[in-house]
Amino acid sequence: MASRPPPADRWSSWQALDSGRLLLMSTAAMLVVAAFATSTIEASKINMGVALAFGGFIALGELLRLALPGGREAAPIAMIGGMAYALLPQMSGHARSSIPQLLVVAVAAVGMLVGALPHIAAGREAGLTGMCTRLVAIACVAFVFHPAGADLIVHQGWPVRLLVMTPIIGVGWLVETIISALIRADDVGAKFSVAIADEIRVQWPLGAAIGASVVIIVFGYDVMGLSELGVFLGPLLVTQVAFRRYAGIRATYLQTVRSLARVTEVAGYVEAGHSRRVSRLAVAVGRELGLAEPDLLRVEYAALMHDIGQLSLRDPIPGGATVQVSAADQDRIAELGADVIREAGVLDDVAELVRCQSWPAGGRDQAPPLGSMIIRAANAFDDMVGVSTDRERSATALDRLRVDETEFDRRVVAALAEVAGRRPAWRL
Amino acid sequence: MVSRAAWLYIGLVVLVTAALVDSTSFTPSAIRHFWLYLVILQLLFLVCDSTPAPLVSRQTKWSPSSSATLAAVVLLGPVAAALVGAVSLLSIKRQLKVPERVFNGAMTALSGLLAGKTYLALHGHVGLPGRADFPEIILPFAAAAAAHVIANQGLIWGVYRLNRGPGMLRREGLESSLPLLLVSDLGYAALGLIIASLWSVMYGFAAALVLVPLFVARWAMGQFAEQQRAYSATMKALCQAVETKDYYTRGHGDRVSLGSVMIARQIGMGADRTDAIEFAGMLHDVGKLGVPTTVLQKTGPLTEDEYAAIQLHPMRGLEIVREIGFLNEALAGIMHHHERIDGRGYPMGFAGHEIPEFARIIAVADAFDSMTSTRSYREAKTIPEAVSELKKGADTQFDPLIVEAFIAALDRYGWRLPEPATEPADLATITVQDHDDPTAPLRVIEVS
């Protein structure tokens, strides 16, 4: 159910093709057109065997896409293949020469499309945005490499070549990361500065592996020739499996917390859908306030489990509306909930957010953490508004949250108003 | 403690290694910079070996050190490969004891030696590989890699078996991680050939370059293990939260989970399914939260409606866990764990093999734990008493094959009884009738 797009997004799929995506796709398309128009002229410079081998490598990489934390998708093997091909000292006879930039673009484009076909046939997403991003990044590597005097460099010794190649690979990786961050910032409504930091945090381990692999392929090619691609697939595939398992367990983890947080609903302690609505609202507010991804994840977990302390109460509070309960009881529920979560031993910072959710924004001895203030406001808002889409009701609720600044933090309420006014997408 | 047999085994490995080292193939003077290259490869081995990543569980650590050994096979020959492997004697893993170090050193040395001999036997060329060696070199190298993996895992298996008795792979759930371990080993063994080839271009710097992807892979594996630990810890904590409502059933989910896993291993269930039943067992009663406390704590006979509320709990449980990315079998196990073989169970009244296997397993573990736990209306039964109750219920309530498997598993693994429960001060948290207890069925008011 979680994967189903909300109805509001379904009819507006063309609107999802925002200007950023459109620009990216047209850039990629122009590159491809230019590549095919030119490559036919330079046919004599094409080593078909090498082109086919790298094209196949890229296609395989595109076939074996990798899910990364946070719903991201990468195709590291395709990136490795593309960048290595761009930097390869091709052997023509006994002389080394670099590969024409536009040939790189053409081979990468064809490889990616071939690799995407099985995804389309299986009814999965084609992943056009990702492919265009990778294609532009690979093209950047190819075009930067050439002005750097590619034909001169391929004749140098390994230290010089390494010194030139490393920053160029860095550029390719940076281009991919920046484009991904731009698109993501637009998709989820995050600030670009936050999105780029998130992107770098998630991508750098993989980026380092990709960079080193490109260097290995380019130098190894001198000795091993094309058989290197086959040999190197072994370690690459095993590494990819490791990443896949990591992303998989992370997703299951979140899914499990989401599901188990609903025990309070099934037990009749809170209204159906309450925890999930509060968590979506809290994450949207946190994003509006510029929280980074790890903090958002913490807020999401804490919001999902914010009522778990009620399980320790003998009988459900009527309606489950915790705002209408005495402050002492709210504190107790928050403490009990934090105890439950602390029991896990791995979510202590989440437990802390849950513990402080009942504190007024004015603070007790110390101010509550921002995450707790967000959950407190989101919870109160949902208690008053619930599933209703009535704008007046939402406005009245916001007015009530604004009454006392010592109760609800002003910045948080302002962000909440922004999120609530923008669109009802955070609803179930 | 290391047994005498294990010592003998370690001695044997050392002896075989020593006997197989023949001086004819050891020609350090024929290869330039032999000793320098050897030391670099030994360092690479040591760095890899000292930072293993947990694979699947905490017992199975894995390190890509074989790539250093196999690079030595190509660059320097079999004896050098043995010398690289022998370095694991010096591993900086602190918790290792002397016999373990000796065994590790001898084992990796022997594996390297065998790999080197395989490589030579298939006419692999020792020395810096050149363009002319490809692609012919791949076959002897692949054979060497396979020999290395087989020797390595075989020798480890031998020492485990000596220390912990037969059947240990299955018992400790290591069997499930074996394919992954073998494939990872083979995959990274291929890196040995890459290192050797890069050596012709950039000498020992190749080793440093290769370390980058190795460490990233290790990082991802470590992250996986960490997430998995966090996952099961969180799951346990949430289950405990569910159980706080009822004093007597604390730890019930955990024990049913354990019992179900014991049965699953006994009947030779695969790794994925065993993982799934572990969680299904833990969560099987989560739907009890949907049953009003007043019903759970009622002393007298239940009304029809109240009984219906109890019968609904497997469905409520399913409702909660449905969206978790489990195998469907786990969901079926939760939903049907109160069905009976004779068709008189709930919620669907399935009979015989209509009942999913997971449900038949959980039913046995569930009833057994209920009987061996203290209840407010009776003392805990002893294990033999509970076993004979299970036997009595075979063919009516339980699947006789599962009961048989459980009894065999009990003999093999034992059973840890819950702490004897003392009467809690707060009487509000006691279940007076246990719906899981086959010896004391719920009393329902007959409506004429």
Image: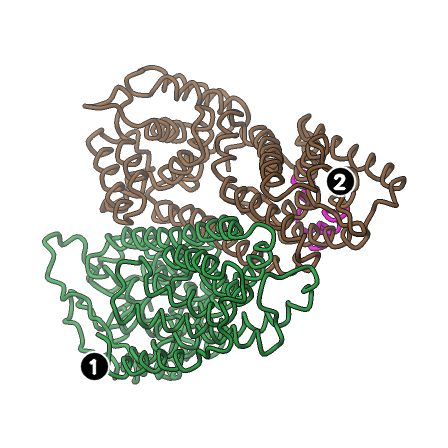
Q: Could you tell me how far apart the alpha carbons at marks 2 and 1 are, in whole angstroms?
A: 75 Å
Q: Position of residue A217 (x, y in %)?
A: 63, 50
Q: Which residues are magenta?
A: A110-130
Would residue B139 be found to the left or right of residue B404 on screen?
Answer: right
Q: Amino acid at mark 2?
A: Val
Please identify which colour was used for chain A in the image.
brown
Q: Colour of chain B?
A: green
- Which quadrant of the view contains residue B305? bottom left
The structure residue drawn at horizontal position 58% and vertical position 33%, both measured from the top left corner, is A174
Tag on residue A239?
A: none
What residue does disc 2 label?
A: A105
Residue A41 relative to residue A72: left or right: right
- The residue identified by callout 1 is B385
- With respect to residue A365, does B256 lie above or below? below
Local packing at callout 2 (Cα closer than 10 Å; few below 14, some 14-19, many 20+) is many
In this rendering, position of residue B180 left or right of residue A17: left
